[in-house]
Structures are given as structure tokens and as C-alpha cells.
Amino acid sequence: MGTIKPFLTGMLLLQAVHAAGGDAERDAQLQRMERAISRIQQEQQSTYQEFGMVQELRRSLMQQNTPPPPPAVIGVDDLPSYDEQARQHKRVEEQLQRYTVELEGLYARYRELEAQKRSLLDRVRELSQSP
């Protein structure tokens, strides 16, 4: 009977040490996840700002692409060349397409980051709720 009590005390101490070690590991995991979430949020903010800038460039280009009213005909030399107008229009349309592709890529990246963040937040919630 005298040897069981020290044995049980030792087992309880080992369990307490193991639990404390588990808490330390859980806390370390939580800290790593919080840092990762912070980095993701910073990248999301950067992506959002870049999206806004590209969107504004695209909007501005679309406004510039609105053809001005035709000039009063004074002479044939005063009219802009049809070929030059067509080339300019094609360049603008190509740039608009590039902006559109870039916007789609930025939006996809933002959604990807959101999914990563959501996954980390779910894991943080799980770790926070575990005993």
C-alpha cells in the first residue's frame, strides 16, 4: 500500500507535466497561426489596394476611349486618319483586356487568401476550445 501512493502521485505529476507541455505547444501553435493570419491579412490588403488601382486605371481608360464629337470639317487634312483611329482603338481595347485579366487574377488571389485565412481561423477556434 505504501508503494501505490507514490506511484499514483508520480503518475499525476507526469500527467500534469504532459498537460502543461501540451498547453505550451498549443499556445505556440496559436501564436504561429495568428502570425500567419496577420501576414495573410496584410497580403489581402495589398491585393485589395492593387485591385482598386487597376480598376481605376481601367475606368479611366474607358472614359478616355469615348470618342470626342467629330470636328467641324474645314479641310480633309484636319480629319484624323481612319487607320490611325482604328489602331488607337485596338490598342485601347487590348489594354482594357489586359486590365480585365489582371483584375480577375487579383480577385482570385484575394479569394484564395480568404480561404487560407478562414481555414486558419477555424483551426485557431478549435485549438482555443480544446481543454
Image: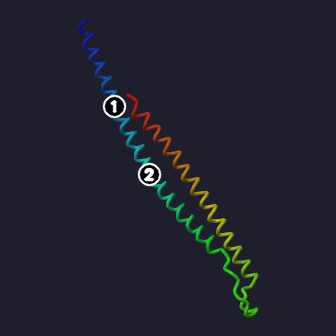
Indicate the position of residue 62 as horizontal and vertical percent values: 63, 70
Identify the secondary structure beneath mark 2. Answer: helix
Quadrant in which residue 89 is drawn: bottom right
| Residue situated in front as seen by the camera: 51 or 29 | 51
Identity of the residue drawn at 53% across and 65% down: 53
Q: Which residue, given by chain and number where applicable, does mark 1 sit on?
A: 21
Instruction: Name the amino acid, label 1.
Output: Gly
Identify the secondary structure beneath mark 1. Answer: helix
In the displayed structure image, the side of residue 110 where residue 129 appears, left or right: left
Crowd tier of the residue under label 2, counting other residues whose Cα lies within 10 Å: few below 14, some 14–19, many 20 or above = few
Identity of the residue drawn at 64% across and 65% down: 98
Q: How far apart, in angstroms, are the residues tagged by discs 1 and 2? A: 27 Å
**Is label 1 or label 2 in front?**
2
Instruction: Name the amino acid, label 2.
Output: Arg
Q: Which of marks 1 and 2 is nearer the N terminus?
A: 1
Position of 68 relative to 120 (above/below): below
Crowd tier of the residue under label 1, counting other residues whose Cα lies within 10 Å: few below 14, some 14–19, many 20 or above = few
Mark carried by residue 39: 2
Q: Quadrant of the C terminus?
A: top left
| Residue situated in front as seen by the camera: 35 or 98 | 98
In the displayed structure image, the side of residue 113 where residue 96 appears, left or right: right
Q: In which quarter of the image is the N terminus?
A: top left
Indicate the position of residue 43 as horizontal and vertical percent values: 48, 55
